[in-house]
Image (tube, coloured by chain):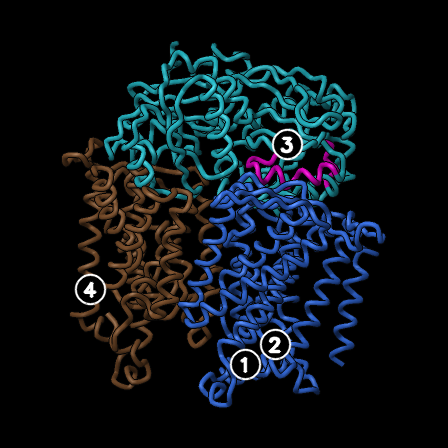
């Protein structure tokens, strides 16, 4: 049943370009989709391990920069007279490296910062994102700092000589983002349902108990952070190759806030939550734009956010799931349900 | 301010309700992509208000090609992703054949791939990054000076200032970094020594640390590049630290009146490279238009200090309108071709595009005038050289 | 040498303002466990009150300060009653997001009403600085430092020497027991949030005239306040004061002797280092708060 719903949802989303001809709305869907992938990765951390990262945009931005620099090439000097000269590689290699580097950073940050929890963890992650932003801003030789990296090539698959496909049009990019999002969704669903996923949730529920039955806290959390950061890096790579320009503003705090809003309003700890929350808050500005003044749009945005939290404190998807109970209690959505009962 | 924003929303609402096709027959649309919320809201709003003066003036004189001009104003939220989305909306939903935007360089750079995609030209009114006209985007027509143009203009007067060694204090973005780079290069050619280059973050309010460092160097002049709010703070904090070096600001959006009003005596003796002279309409290249613009600006109840930003919106719309007139139709390709042939008497010099960037796909860049003014005893004066 | 002395004097002046920002937040964030994103907007609010009272109503500068503090108190109480009380018992993420929503809406409302152009607040202090040998400082900054010190002492007394402070401390140690002992827990929550907010507004009212007043002015201030609270340890007022001075020193020396581009990174690097090596902050909370 769950599988059927997921397939229907993907099919519905895949059909969108067939009846939606407006490139402006398609563009909004693509950028929203990229941020939804980021939100899904954040949900893995926030929803399934209970750790709130307010610096998640760091991994997204690292992915964007790694991917862009890989496909543009760079030439930097290092202390001691060394030079690193990198010739441009195909964007797909950039994508792969973006995932790897972001995942590595996620692992290291997780390893170091999971020693602190709660509010302290929140602040460490904000600090990390700010430091990364300042490095991107000030290491001008590598990142061109505020001058921005421009002319980033569009994503392409294949390898030179073996035939290749370039994602040039909006339609191509829509399916690229949708495909990547579906893959990430599957990956997270598998992970959450695995032995490892159970260990994560056990930690979230009761850390002392989890440790007593032999779960390695730091290792589990670090791996969760690694996977989460890798997915965020993938989203960042898609962003760079779609926008074709990135500058340190990609690390803006409001971008993290957007992802957190998507996860929590949709329902943290529910697989579909970030998708639903993401589509609502990603497309809301598009809907508000024609009806009110620019400042009023932001006021409405904040007001709707508070209203959703007030009406559905556990998020939209869990609230809906309560009205339409699923027969299969092992489905990940059920966890959010159980959370709701606990807090009640 | 409230009024103007309601007008913005009304226009946006009207556009949305009536749809592109209903209005297309009666009006000629010009897209305006500016930051109305977020970090650059103040400047973006000024530019939009200047743009409206131009549109109203054109309409009062009978419009363009027998039709009324309609500005489609959209807020890019000071966010590059949104700036690209706004461009997409203006081009595809509103079918604007030409646009003006997008204030900041990163906003403009984010819009540029969309111009290539849809082959629609854009008049760039404020952005200063050299990348905008050098990356081979033939749909870009810039009326604001990049820092290299400003440096070249300053070169002609630099001898008379008898500079020996200068330090820089610049905002840490493309504008500040670009200025430090281009001015250093020019000054080195002139045999002037370059000291330290200090930066400040865009939102920073306390520059005492940087200024204390600059106080201790052996340079006699500091070149400062940033927006008006930080300039005000710098003058106040420099005075509090007893920093008595000559300060020259660049960039053309200094609003000297706001500096005088807010920094008081601390602003005395500072010099400013500016691109518009609202204080001396008679000395501008187009005195009549300047006087009209300033009287209209005051009539609408806007702050006089905003003139040094808003005139670019006014010039930008007049540039786009001149191109539409010349093209004879509201068609992107025709307007793009016509932009190369126009000669508009702008408020700060003739707007006449010269080719810039890689051959075959050059962007247009006009060469605005640059003036050096000095604040003395709370008043703005032309620096006599 | 004189440059170094000037950096130290700057640190003293800047540190006082950071400490003031920190103590308001440490009450709310540290004690109530609310990641309070409205702290920055209350700072902005205090500054706008100064602008309205001094510039628009042309009233006395020193009269405007208490007006700003009281307005901040009232707005804080209102936010707690309407936005936080309905979410009592929700987890930290939900209340944080409610505060984010309030922050976005209130900041945009400020922009809508006053526009984005920065305002300045006239002050009665002389423009010429106080010169002490090789270093100098403005009179206004000295006044702000003194006022900040006074507010810090008052807050300390409030927490440690009054019945309300006692109730606050009891509530945040164990709110069930406190309720059983007859403490009006709801009142304590509202009071704490209101006091923290009024301190943020006070910081804005004092610093608005030093800097300029505009809608986003609170964003950077709030980030620094979070850093200070973490450095000092949650709920630790003395720690927040010391944390404020440490952050100011790091920024001054970082900008003066390392690189001004990384000035704002200094604070964050210290936080990362502190939390890795001393995960509970430099001055962890002891058994009791205050």
Q: For mark 4, what is the residue?
A: C156
Q: Is residue B316 above or below residue C86?
A: above
**Residue at coordinates 49% horizontally, 71% vertically from top-left?**
A51
Viewer-proximal residue among A91 and C11: A91
Label 1 – label 4 distance at C-alpha: 39 Å
Q: For mark 3, what is the residue?
A: B100
Question: Are the residues at dot 2 and dot 3 in contact (C-beta closer than 8 Å)?
Answer: no
- Of the numbered discs in the image, which one, if any, rests on residue A318? 2
Judging from the image, what is the letter of the chain drawn in cyan?
B
Question: Are the residues at dot 1 and dot 2 in contact (C-beta closer than 8 Å)?
Answer: yes
Whether residue A344 is visible to the viewer of this picture, yes or no, is no
Residue A9 is left or right of residue C104, and the answer is right
Judging from the image, what is the letter of the chain drawn in blue?
A
In x, y percent, where is residue B261?
33, 29
Q: For mark 1, what is the residue?
A: A340
Question: Residue lying farthest bottom?
Answer: A213
- Mark 4 secondary-structure assignment: helix
Label 1 – label 3 distance at C-alpha: 51 Å
Chain C is which colour? brown
Label 2 – label 3 distance at C-alpha: 45 Å
- Mark 2 secondary-structure assignment: helix
**In terms of sequence position, does the residue under pointer 1 or pointer 2 come before the other?**
2
- Mark 3 secondary-structure assignment: strand
- Magenta region, residue range: B94-116
Residue B354 among magenta residues: no
Q: Determine the image quadrant of residue B229.
A: top left
Mark 2 residue crowding within 10 angstroms, few (<14) / some (14–19) / many (20+): many
In which chain is the residue bearing label 3?
A: B
Foreground label between 2 and 4: 4
């Amino acid at each position: 049943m769950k599988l059927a719903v997921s397939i229907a949802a993907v099919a519905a989303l895949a059909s969108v370009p067939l009846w939606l001809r407006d490139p402006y709305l398609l563009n909004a869907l693509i950028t929203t989709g990229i941020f939804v992938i980021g939100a899904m990765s954040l949900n893995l951390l926030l929803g399934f391990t209970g750790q709130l990262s307010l610096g998640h945009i760091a991994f997204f931005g690292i992915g964007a920069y790694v991917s862009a620099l890989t496909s543009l090439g760079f030439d930097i000097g290092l202390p001691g007279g060394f030079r690193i000269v990198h010739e441009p590689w195909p964007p797909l290699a950039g994508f792969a490296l973006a995932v790897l580097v972001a995942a590595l950073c996620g692992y290291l940050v997780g390893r170091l910062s999971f020693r602190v929890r709660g509010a302290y963890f929140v602040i460490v992650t904000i600090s990390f994102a700010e430091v990364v932003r300042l490095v991107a801003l000030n290491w001008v030789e590598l990142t061109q700092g505020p001058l921005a990296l421009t002319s980033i090539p569009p994503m392409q698959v294949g390898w030179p000589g073996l035939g290749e496909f370039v994602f040039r049009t909006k339609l191509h990019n829509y399916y690229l983002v949708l495909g990547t999002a579906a893959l990430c969704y599957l990956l997270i669903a598998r992970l959450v349902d695995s032995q490892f996923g159970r260990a994560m949730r056990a930690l979230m529920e009761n850390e002392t108990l989890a440790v007593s039955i032999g779960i390695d806290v730091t290792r589990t959390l670090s791996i969760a952070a690694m996977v989460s950061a890798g997915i965020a890096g993938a989203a960042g790579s898609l962003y760079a190759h779609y926008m074709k320009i990135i500058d340190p503003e990609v690390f803006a705090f409001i971008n993290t806030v957007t992802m957190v809003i998507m996860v929590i309003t949709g329902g943290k700890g529910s697989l579909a939550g970030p998708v639903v929350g993401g589509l609502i808050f990603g497309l809301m500005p598009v809907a508000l734009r024609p009806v009110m003044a620019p400042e009023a749009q932001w006021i409405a945005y904040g007001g709707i956010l508070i209203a959703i939290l007030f009406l559905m404190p556990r998020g939209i998807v869990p609230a809906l799931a309560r009205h339409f109970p699923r027969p299969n209690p092992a489905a990940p959505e059920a966890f959010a349900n159980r959370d709701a009962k606990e807090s009640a | 301010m409230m009024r103007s924003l309601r007008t913005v929303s009304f226009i946006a609402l009207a556009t949305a309700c009536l749809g592109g096709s209903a209005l297309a027959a009666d009006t000629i649309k010009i897209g305006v992509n500016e930051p109305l919320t977020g970090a650059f809201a103040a400047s973006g709003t000024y530019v939009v208000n200047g743009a409206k003066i131009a549109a109203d003036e054109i309409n009062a004189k009978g419009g363009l090609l027998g039709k009324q001009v309609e500005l489609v104003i959209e807020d890019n939220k000071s966010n590059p992703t949104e700036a690209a989305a706004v461009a997409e909306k203006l081009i595809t939903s509103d079918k604007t054949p030409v646009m003006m935007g997008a204030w900041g360089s990163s906003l403009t750079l984010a819009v540029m791939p969309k111009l290539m995609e849809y082959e629609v030209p854009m008049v760039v009114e404020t952005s200063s990054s050299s990348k905008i006209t050098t990356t081979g985007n033939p749909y870009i027509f810039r009326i604001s000076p990049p820092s290299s143009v400003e440096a070249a203009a300053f070169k002609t007067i630099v001898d008379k200032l008898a500079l020996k060694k200068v330090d820089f204090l610049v905002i840490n973005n493309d504008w500040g970094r670009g200025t430090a780079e281009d001015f250093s290069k020019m000054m080195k050619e002139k045999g002037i020594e370059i000291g330290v280059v200090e930066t400040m973050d865009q939102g920073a309010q306390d520059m005492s640390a940087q200024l204390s460092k600059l106080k201790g160097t052996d340079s006699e002049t500091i070149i400062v590049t940033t927006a008006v709010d930080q300039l005000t703070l710098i003058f106040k904090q420099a005075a509090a630290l007893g920093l008595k070096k000559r300060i020259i600001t660049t960039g053309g959006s200094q609003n000297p009146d706001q500096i005088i009003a807010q920094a008081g005596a601390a602003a005395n003796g500072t010099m400013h490279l500016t691109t518009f002279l609202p204080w001396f309409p008679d000395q501008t290249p187009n005195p009549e238009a300047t006087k009209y613009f300033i009287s209209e600006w005051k009539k609408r109840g806007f702050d006089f200090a905003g003139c040094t930003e808003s005139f670019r919106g006014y010039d930008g719309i007049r540039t786009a309108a001149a191109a539409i007139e010349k093209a004879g139709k509201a068609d992107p390709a025709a307007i793009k071709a016509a932009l190369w042939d126009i000669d508009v008497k702008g408020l700060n010099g003739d707007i006449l595009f010269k080719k810039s960037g890689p051959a075959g796909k050059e962007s247009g860049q006009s060469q605005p005038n640059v003036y050096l003014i000095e604040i003395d005893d709370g008043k703005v004066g032309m620096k006599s050289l | 040498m004189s440059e170094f002395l000037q950096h130290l004097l700057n640190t003293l002046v800047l540190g006082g303002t950071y400490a003031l920002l920190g103590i308001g937040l440490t009450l709310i964030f540290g004690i109530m466990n609310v990641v309070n994103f409205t702290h920055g907007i209350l700072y902005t609010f205090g500054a706008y009150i100064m602008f309205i009272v001094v510039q628009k109503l042309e009233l006395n500068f020193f009269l405007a300060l208490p007006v700003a503090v009281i307005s901040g108190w009232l707005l804080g109480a209102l936010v707690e009653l309407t936005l936080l009380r309905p979410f009592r018992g929700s987890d930290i993420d939900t209340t944080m997001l409610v505060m984010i929503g309030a922050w976005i809406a209130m900041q945009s409302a400020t922009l809508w009403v006053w526009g984005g152009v920065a305002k300045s607040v006239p002050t009665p202090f002389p423009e010429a600085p106080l010169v002490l040998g090789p270093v100098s400082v403005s009179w206004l900054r000295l006044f702000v430092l003194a006022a900040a010190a006074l507010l810090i002492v008052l807050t300390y007394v409030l927490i440690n020497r009054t019945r309300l402070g006692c109730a606050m401390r009891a509530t945040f140690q164990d709110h069930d027991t406190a309720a059983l002992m007859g403490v009006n827990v709801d009142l304590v929550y509202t009071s704490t949030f209101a006091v923290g907010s009024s301190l943020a507004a006070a910081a804005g009212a004092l610093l608005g005239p030093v800097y300029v007043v505009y809608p986003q002015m609170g964003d950077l201030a709030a980030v620094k306040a979070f850093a200070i609270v973490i450095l000092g340890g949650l709920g630790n007022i003395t720690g927040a004061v010391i944390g404020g001075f440490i952050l100011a020193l790091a920024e001054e020396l970082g900008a003066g002797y390392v690189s001004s581009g990384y000035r704002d990174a200094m604070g964050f690097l210290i936080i990362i280092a502190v939390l890795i090596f001393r995960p509970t902050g430099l001055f962890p909370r002891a058994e009791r708060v205050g």
